[in-house]
Image: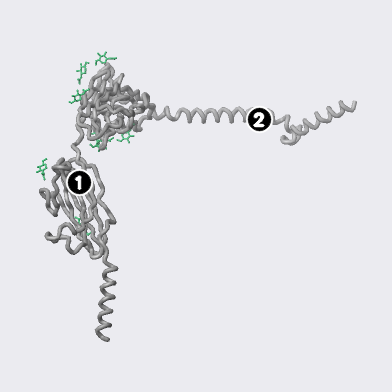
């Protein structure tokens, strides 16, 4: 009796165990990827099964007849391989490939098995390993030859790019200027040699050009197109009051922007006196950014500071300049409009006063002034009515 019961329990336990045991199955498979040389890649593999399956990584290199298959371990391939595996509720294994080389191109295979005989060399054919593969393709950086590499001091230019080692078929190309796609430069041509024509190289068209080939991955190269900067006064004529501070501003556009700014004051004989920051009892202060220069002239003096100022911007291509006329008004001049208004008011008041004084005697006989007009119209109305009734 006891033996029977024990046997039944054992049988149930074994049955339960057998029902629960199941062969390995992937819940996450590694993904194929394309990478540039020296980049890194991560391949994930997750497997369920009972017991928890063992996961291995294998590398398959070369084509079918002469392919070589090697198992990967932590530190393999000159320490470029790292494997991080956990076997908790199920098996997870991540293969990290660092500092990719062209010879890392190949098939990476995740193998999993929970067959108890899986590693028994004497019984190989029975052992069931399940497999999941991913392709990793490592590219060289695309080599784009530019001609010319830099455009400087030219009136017109033809930019060209030659992609000498397309990493994959070219699906088209486009050009950008300062990071913005140039309208109409987008094309679906599969040519590896492209050109872009600039009819007039000036500050409007100067900038950093980039040719982009729509391959996988994209290939690009840059060409610098330099022109004389465009320097222009923010206002060509500036008015300020004596003792006040004037701010003279010049801005610049184009590529490259000025690396140096200089200010000059045109003197009586037509020469130019350089203005140095902080000189003349701190009268002058200069503030510069590549695209803007500001000259502050403080404590303005009519004789000394009125006149023509010049801002000069210099880049490695050359120099450009503009002029600003500074007019200084005396402090009294600033008062003139106000004094004019005061004088006008005084004159008006005087006229009204005189006029009122002259009218006064008549008004007394007519009665109260505000009623005057209404009585007048009343009279008129009466006259009209009388005329009508006649
Ligand atoms: C892969 O190629 C690099 C040179 O590009 C070489 O140094 C390295 O030994 C090669 N790795 C293997 C595993 O053959
Ligand atoms: C390895 O896995 C563990 C647990 O998932 C994680 O904490 C650890 O950061 C991983 N190591 C690397 C190098 O990713
Ligand atoms: C630009 O070209 C002119 C003549 O076209 C030449 O005189 C000048 O030196 C050139 N400047 C630079 C920076 O090459
Ligand atoms: C383009 O510039 C070159 C010199 O840089 C000049 O000889 C040629 O005439 C220019 N072409 C046009 C169409 O302006
Ligand atoms: C592009 O470069 C290749 C390789 O250097 C060369 O054979 C080919 O002539 C070039 N194409 C053009 C249009 O310059
Ligand atoms: C050009 O290539 C660089 C890497 O070489 C990349 O960072 C950049 O985003 C690319 N530019 C475009 C417009 O594709
Ligand atoms: C001019 O001097 C002021 C004050 O010392 C300083 O803030 C400013 O950067 C100087 N400007 C230039 C162009 O050196
Ligand atoms: C000058 O450059 C700054 C950033 O460097 C930019 O914010 C500003 O808009 C530019 N000003 C002009 C007038 O181009």
Tell me if residue 281 comes above or below residue 318 in the rendering: below
On screen, residue 171 versus residue 346, left or right, reads left
Q: Residue furthest right?
A: 390
Which dot marks residue 357?
2
Q: Position of residue 356 (x, y in %)?
A: 66, 30
The one nearer the camera, 62 or 362, is 62
Q: Secondary structure at mark 1?
A: strand
Nearer to us: label 2 or label 1: 1
Give the position of the C terminus as an image quadrant. Answer: top right
Q: Position of residue 280 (x, y in %)?
A: 25, 30
The one nearer the camera, 245 or 227, is 227
The one nearer the camera, 372 or 219, is 219
Q: Residue at x 41, y 29 (%)?
A: 332
Q: Secondary structure at mark 2?
A: helix
Q: Earlier in the sequence, mark 2 or mark 1?
A: 1
Q: Decide if residue 185 is in sight here.
A: yes
Q: Which residue is mark 1?
A: 107
């Amino acid at each position: 009796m006891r033996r029977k019961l024990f046997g039944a329990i054992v049988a149930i336990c074994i049955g339960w165990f057998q029902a629960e045991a199941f062969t390995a199955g992937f819940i996450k498979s590694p993904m194929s990827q394309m990478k540039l040389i020296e980049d890194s890649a991560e391949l994930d593999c997750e497997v369920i099964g009972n017991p928890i399956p063992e996961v291995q990584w294998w590398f398959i290199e070369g084509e079918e007849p002469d392919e070589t298959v090697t198992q990967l371990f932590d530190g393999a391939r000159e320490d470029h391989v790292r494997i991080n595996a956990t076997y908790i509720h199920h098996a997870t294994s991540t293969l990290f490939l660092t500092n990719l080389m062209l010879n890392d191109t190949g098939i990476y295979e995740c193998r999993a098995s929970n067959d108890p005989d899986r590693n028994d060399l004497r019984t190989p054919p029975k052992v069931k390993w399940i497999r999941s593969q991913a392709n990793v393709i490592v590219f060289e950086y695309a080599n784009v030859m530019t001609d010319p590499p830099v455009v400087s001091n030219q009136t017109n230019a033809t930019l060209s790019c030659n992609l000498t080692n397309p990493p994959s078929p070219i699906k088209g190309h486009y050009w950008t200027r300062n990071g913005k796609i140039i309208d109409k430069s987008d094309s679906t041509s599969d040519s590896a040699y492209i050109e872009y024509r600039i009819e007039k190289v000036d500050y409007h068209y100067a900038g950093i050009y980039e040719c982009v080939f729509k391959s996988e991955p994209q290939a690009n190269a840059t060409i610098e197109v330099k022109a004389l900067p465009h320097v222009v006064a923010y206002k060509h004529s500036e008015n300020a009051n004596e003792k006040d501070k004037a701010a003279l501003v010049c801005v610049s556009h184009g590529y490259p922007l000025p690396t140096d700014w200089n200010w000059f004051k045109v003197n009586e004989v037509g020469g130019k006196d350089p203005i140095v920051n902080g000189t003349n009892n701190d009268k002058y202060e200069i503030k510069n950014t590549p695209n803007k220069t500001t000259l502050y002239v403080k404590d303005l003096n009519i004789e000394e500071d009125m006149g023509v100022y010049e801002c000069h911007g210099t880049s490695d291509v050359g120099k450009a300049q503009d002029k600003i006329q500074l007019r200084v008004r005396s402090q009294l001049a600033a008062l003139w409009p106000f004094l004019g208004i005061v004088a006008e008011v005084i004159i008006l008041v005087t006229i009204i006063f005189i006029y009122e004084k002259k009218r006064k005697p008549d008004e007394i006989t007519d009665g109260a002034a505000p009623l005057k007009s209404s009585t007048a119209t009343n009279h008129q109305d009466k006259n009209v009515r009388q005329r009508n009734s006649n």
